Image (spheres, grey):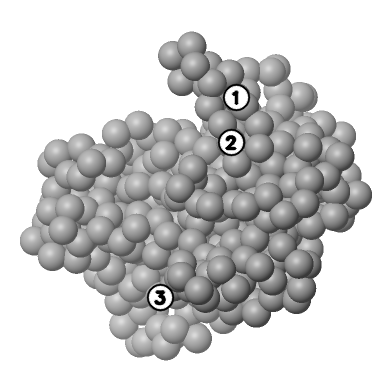
Amino acid sequence: MESYVPAPPPGPIANLISLGVLANYVSRDVVDEAVEEAGKAAQRSDVKLTPSFVVYFVMALALFAHDDYEEVTQQMAGCLADWGAGFDPTSGGLTKARQRLGARPLQLLFSKVARPVAEEETAGAFFGQWRAVSIDGLIFDAEVSKANVEEFGLPGSAEGRAGVTQVRAVTICECASHAPLRAALGPAGSGKGTGERTLARPLLSQLDPDWILLADRGFYSFADWCTADDTGAALLWRVGADLRLPVLREFTDGSYESVVIDPKARGKAREALLAAARAGEPLDRARARYVRVVEYDVPDREGSGSHELFALITNILDPADADARALAGLYVWRWEHEIGNKQIKTYLRGPGKILRSRSPDLVYQEIWGYLLTHFTIAALICQGATAAGIDPDRVRYTRTMRLVRRRAGDPSSSP
């Protein structure tokens, strides 16, 4: 849950806001580049509502999730004047402009601007030589329109509530800042759902070598582990009890060396790979990988009075690089992702809030707008906290969000 530690004086954050809000981290040049790359450059009919303006408008829709189009444009009145748009856009005109733009420019824009924002001085940003990042999913509820149901599935699911159709987002986020760095979207409604692991798969090939990726047990498969491992990034993933992890060698820190084997290798093929691992021989990496295992008990985690065994696997094979206790402590950082998801779902979007779009392309566009806006707020908090020498968790997200909202229409903050 959000920290209740008193927030620091607002000076560093307020000063940053005065230099620009959304456009401070999502520049006009990059917006224009994404629009051009998506083939959505302005036409003659777009003289007033240019594609680049509509991009910022979609981000503003995320910032003012409870307001209608007219109210959002009023919040952006100062920016409209600064853009030379001396007019009052209608709701219908804004809807048509969003439809002309589509989702692709915002998806490309996210891929261009989303980046790590924590610095070496940022509290909780690094584990040794690695930047801590995590992967997780979240669900967005969307309107039940014919087009949305056809794309996303029937209303309601085991994860959601009746009366809505649902969209899943899987993101890789920076633990310290909660800033999303990579993202994939797909249907989550009944009958059409795309699982977290499926959406995560293309993201795992996009890891940076200086990252350490934390993942919960739902993300492990041998193929996906290999994909992530091949990037050169460090990995620390929780795995389920059904994964066989033979003890090859025990270390003094309590961890042990093991091997993960392609489940397609059965019978004699599996035994041959296991024998090679026990002998310490080089393995066919397409079929087996050495890992190190850290196991520990979490007492009364579910409030039932019983303990729960956690099993973590890592590709950091030498305990001298990271001992078992440190790795167990690091895994707790994965919960920073849950905080980031809550910031989007509860504080930015609002509890129980349904996306306003009634067509799939605009639903995806709207979600990319949420991710971009959340990125800017998270980056703003992290930059201000680092400058003030405090942990970003000590800066209240809701307070910063309100400051950003108040400055959204300031011409000095326009792109």
Q: Which mark is residue 310?
A: 2
> Which residue is rendered at x = 59% and y = 62% of the image?
260
> Callout 1, which amino acid?
Val
Q: From the viewer's perspective, is 253 left or right of 247?
A: right
Q: Mark 3, residues whose alpha carbon is within 10 Å: few (<14), some, or many (≥20)?
A: some
Residue 316 in percent (x, y) is at 78, 56
Q: Which of marks 3 and 1 is in front?
A: 1
User: CB of mark 1 within 8 Å of CB of mark 2?
Assistant: yes
From this viewpoint, is residue 110 visible?
no
Q: Earlier in the sequence, mark 3 or mark 1?
A: 3
Residue to which mark 1 is pinned: 298
Residue 300 in percent (x, y) is at 53, 16
The quadrant of the rendering that contains the C terminus is bottom right
Residue to which mark 3 is pinned: 104
Q: Earlier in the sequence, mark 1 or mark 2?
A: 1
User: CB of mark 3 within 8 Å of CB of mark 1?
Assistant: no
View extreme (left): residue = 146
Image-quadrant location for residue 175: top right
> Which residue is rendered at x = 63% and y = 18% of the image?
4
The quadrant of the rendering that contains the N terminus is top right
Secondary structure beneath label 2: strand
> Callout 3, which amino acid?
Arg
> CA gap, disc 1 to disc 2?
7 Å
> Callout 2, which amino acid?
Phe
Q: Which of marks 3 and 2 is nearer the N terminus?
A: 3
Judging depth in this view, the residue of 299 and 141 nearest the camera is 299
Secondary structure beneath label 1: strand
Residue 128 in percent (x, y) is at 86, 49
Image-quadrant location for residue 191: bottom left
> CA gap, disc 3 to disc 1?
44 Å
**How many discs mark residues in the rendered view?**
3
Judging depth in this view, the residue of 299 and 287 nearest the camera is 287
